[in-house]
Amino acid sequence: MTQISHSRRLRRTPFSQGVESFDIKAYTVYNHMLLPTVFRSIQEDYRHLKEAVQVWDVSCERQIELRGPDAGRLMQYLTPRDLRLMQPGQCYYVPIVDETGGMLNDPVAVKLADDRWWISIADSDLLYWVKGLAYGLRLDVLVDEPDVSPLAVQGPQAEDLMAEVFGDAVRDIRFFRFGHFEFQGRSLVVARSGYSKQGGFEIYVEGADIGMPLWNALIEAGKSMDVHAGCPNLIERIEGGLLSYGNDMTDDNTPHECGLGKFCNTQAAIGCVGRDALLRVAKEGPVQQIRPISIDGDAVPICGDFWPVLAGGKKVGRVSSAAWSPDFETNVAIGMVRMTHWDPGTELKVGTPSGLRSAVVQSRFWI
Amino acid sequence: MTQISHSRRLRRTPFSQGVESFDIKAYTVYNHMLLPTVFRSIQEDYRHLKEAVQVWDVSCERQIELRGPDAGRLMQYLTPRDLRLMQPGQCYYVPIVDETGGMLNDPVAVKLADDRWWISIADSDLLYWVKGLAYGLRLDVLVDEPDVSPLAVQGPQAEDLMAEVFGDAVRDIRFFRFGHFEFQGRSLVVARSGYSKQGGFEIYVEGADIGMPLWNALIEAGKSMDVHAGCPNLIERIEGGLLSYGNDMTDDNTPHECGLGKFCNTQAAIGCVGRDALLRVAKEGPVQQIRPISIDGDAVPICGDFWPVLAGGKKVGRVSSAAWSPDFETNVAIGMVRMTHWDPGTELKVGTPSGLRSAVVQSRFWI
């Protein structure tokens, strides 16, 4: 393994001090910011996430704030998902595409008010696309990156831990809804969401100065629950079929290829960028699509580049994420497979750095 | 030091195999791509760069291609630098700003033809800004990221090494000009440029398949010149005053604050985004500006976050890059200092992780 070189360009977060008070072993870089990836080990972190509760520094989910009379109009330009019925207090997962229907990001939109939105982004400078559109289309809206750093609390005991710090009212937050909760006199947006299938919350920490006090309060309150610093877990997110922009999809892919067609209401989302291209895709269907794939043999190495998926010696797709699953006792993987070979049960070969492996298309992710 | 977690999202390059055949010790991430930062050690790499010749994998300088009748018009929208006299065959360093004059990137524009440009970018997804503008302004231009990965050859013996591989005609390329040169039947753009003050070239390697053959040819041809894999060197680039976007400047800063006012012809570059804001800045001058700063004492630690610059206990700026310079026997640093304290010779304090240090504003960088 290689070291990561620290520099100001790879931004630290309001919680870095807390993260580094634990046994952080590895970082990745996400939106020009440090994102922890391993504490004790990927396997230990995985087990602990599924059994206890973790506090995750996901500051790298940077926010784009849209403010002003055209905020809602711009938001609807950005995504093919129909936002007309969305209410303040709701979060929507929204594919963002360019004019050809290629994915630019897959963020969560947070509707604070009719004229104020946050977009909680995946790993690309979506801010530049949004600013470029707002400028080019001369919309009456302010677009910037506010001082908001999400902190996630994930795991089966997440609700109990959150209730200790924010009170029992957090238990009433429904999935992909949010409320405003007080911490040390500050009102923070708290949503039931997060990048795991273990349940939990994301706290939109507004103001870097409140970061460490909140981190410390959660760690202190969680002692009896075996709380630990954590991070998105490679194994758990593949098992759960949580896609990662830049890994499993890029701007080469349409939402339909990524299995996100259900979030594209191209008949309704009139005026959205990419509508014409996606109408065509929606009509004809994609010719390749994301599939869960099990890979035979012992634990595969890190997937640092696309692995070719082969059938009869011909390339029919690629694997973009893979890991050994202790719970399912197989290598779980996310791949993009051509329609000729995407039916569940189809037997394939995957070219991994440790040789050609047998693999099988699954009917569903491991949840 | 912490490890870097590899994943497909941190893209490998056409030269990664070559890089890893050397003793690569550390990576950073730049434009979602792996950029080597240390081979033998920062100090050894520094000495070798100044005395011999290095081959740098700078694939992370991704290209944005503008193609079509409005390519030139879009390029001029993007930058306050006057491009009217720029000819095909020339490279220009072009600050890119948003409508408020805030820096979005500081790339090199490569004019291939009147209707075809490359923008060789620093670390932000400038592609999104350019695409957003082109869409919003309904310009007749194609914008995408082509399969072009720059490979730099830097150091005092760079010209001799390049002549071995491309022929003596490379010696005639003038600074910030480029020509087309053959390698294995492929025509490649070769420019005299690069992110060091030691002289050298950047080869715009079009087509990933030719990457390793070219890498190997350069390493083979350079054996008698003590060629080694290298990378932008922290010490050398600070000595030379080479700014790093994301480190020394962000979208909070105007070009004028970064000492790039000479690249802003706001009277001439009519229609460029940010012109109104920059006209005002050009008239009144910035209130803070980039300065070379020497920091007393032994070697400072890595600058992973802004260090406050103080005078009389008051914050008057920040240091964003710093390193011990063996040649100048002082800590060299790049800082942003308020006008009240930016005169050469001004004595300041810098808050480093190893305590408060005395520091002095310099009249020029160490070149």
Image (spheres, coloured by chain):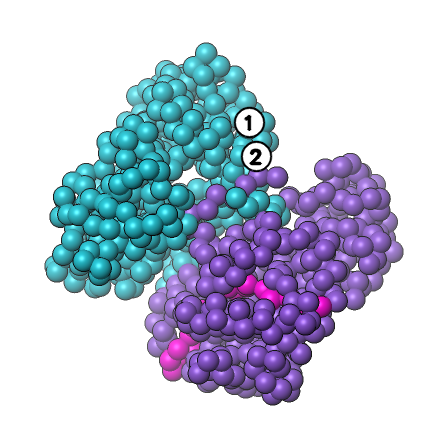
Chain colours: A purple, B cyan
Residue in the picture at 46% in, 85% down: A114
- Identify the image quadrant of the C terminus of chain A: bottom right
Residue in the picture at 30% in, 50% down: B356
Amino acid identity at mark 2? Ser
The answer to whether residue A285 is visible is: no
- Identify the image quadrant of the N terminus of chain A: top right
Residue identifier under label 2: B16
Instruction: Judge depth for marks 2 and 1 and give the one in front.
Output: 1
Assess disc 1: are there few (<14), some (14-19) or many (≥20) residues with their C-alpha within 10 Å of its C-alpha.
Answer: few
The answer to whether residue A326 is visible is: yes
Residue in the picture at 86% in, 49% down: A347
What's the mark number on residue B22? 1
The relative height of residue A238 versus residue A83 in the rendered view (above or below) is: above
In the picture, residue B279 is in which quadrant? bottom left
Residue in the picture at 35% in, 67% down: A135
Instruction: State which tag comes first along the sequence, 2 or 1.
Output: 2
User: Is disc 2 placed on a helix, strand or loop?
Assistant: helix
- Look at the image and give the residue range highlighted in magenta: A52-73
Amino acid identity at mark 1? Phe
